[in-house]
Image (tube, helix red, strand yellow):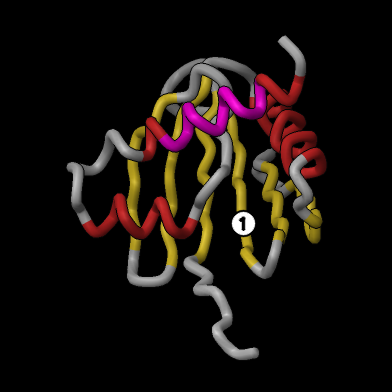
Amino acid sequence: MPLPVRVAAATLLLVSVACERPAPGSREREVAIRAIPNILSYPRSRITQISAGDEAAEVTLVAPTSAGKVADWYRQFLRLNGWQMLSDERRGDGSVVLYAVKDGRPLWITVRTSERGPGTSYTVVGAVVEADSTP
């Protein structure tokens, strides 16, 4: 499948997954949709938690593959979709933290080997950025 088609399919996947939890109409779901729009989930990922405040949201997911593959996939996704990578850091515990910005919207992705068996756990954190209404 060509990459643009995979990107579009994965975008729909994250949007539909993000809409599954928490319950429809919940404040967390609404904030997550505004804070992390158009961000893909790694293929075959499953959401384990969504948490949100008034201005930011965090979605935690698990994927059935290595942390390195998930991190590499996000590096490519961000680059191909116009995100400016500001930080790509490997931490002492083996986790990888990516920080990128697009149109003033910050995004943090933390990828780590799952503590609950094989696979990867990762978080996607975004902030709500309201459009600037000044001329």
Q: Which amino acid type is shown beneath numbered disc 1? A: Leu
- Foreground of the two, 129 or 4: 4
Magenta stretch in the rendered image:
6-15
Q: Which quadrant is the N terminus positioned in?
A: top right
Q: Position of residue 133 (x, y in %)?
A: 55, 84
| Foreground pick, 101 / 2 | 2
In x, y percent, where is residue 76?
Answer: 79, 34
Find numbered disc 1 in the image and state the secondary structure of the residue it sits on.
Answer: strand
Q: Which residue is drawn at 28% across and 55% down?
A: 28
The image quarter in which residue 59 lies: top left
* Mark 1, residue position: 107
Pick the quarter of the image with the C terminus.
Answer: bottom right
Secondary structure that dominates the magenta span? helix
Q: Which residue is drawn at 60% across and 90% down?
A: 134
Q: Is residue 135 above or below residue 26?
A: below
The x and y percentages for residue 2 are 76, 15
